[in-house]
Amino acid sequence: MAVEKFETALKKLEEVVKKLEGGELPLEDSLKAFEEGVKQAAFCSKKLNEAEKRVELLLKQKDGSFAREEFRLDDE
């Protein structure tokens, strides 16, 4: 099975939202689309969390060198 990419999952999620907002799907198809949307949203959220953990800042030191530091949001 191929590894799904964030961009692919996001596009699928956008398509599901568009279908659901259209209001033309029968109830059963709407439920299936909703379930798929939840699955894609969870995948995207997981990938974003993983990416956030990998982000590092390069901070310039007094001696001109750079040091890596983990990126932290102010509210953490």
Image (cartoon, helix red, strand yellow):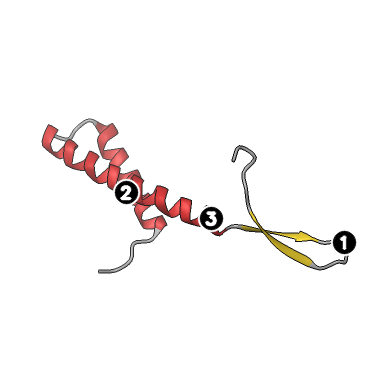
Which of the 4 image quadrants contains residue 6?
bottom left
The disc, 3 or 2, on the residue closer to the chain's N-terminal end is 2
Between label 1 and label 2, give the one nearer the viewer: 1
Residue located at (77% from left, 66% from top): 66
State left or right for residue 72 relative to residue 40.
right
Q: CA distance from mark 1 to mark 2?
A: 45 Å
Nearer to me, 44 or 27: 44
Name the secondary structure under disc 2.
helix
Q: Which residue is mark 1?
A: 62
Query: Residue 71, image x and y in percent?
Result: 63, 52
Q: Which mark is residue 40?
A: 2
The disc, 1 or 3, on the residue closer to the chain's N-terminal end is 3
Q: Give yes or no for contact between labels 1 and 2 (Cβ–Cβ under 8 Å).
A: no
Category of crowding for the residue at label 2, using alpha-carbon neighbours closer than 10 angstroms: few (below 14), some (14–19), many (at least 20)? many
Name the secondary structure under disc 3.
helix
Q: Residue furthest right?
A: 63
Residue located at (22% from left, 30% from top): 23
Q: CA distance from mark 1 to mark 3?
A: 26 Å
Q: Which residue is mark 3?
A: 53
Callout 3 amino acid: Lys
Residue located at (17% from left, 35% from top): 25
Category of crowding for the residue at label 1, using alpha-carbon neighbours closer than 10 angstroms: few (below 14), some (14–19), many (at least 20)? few
Callout 1 amino acid: Lys
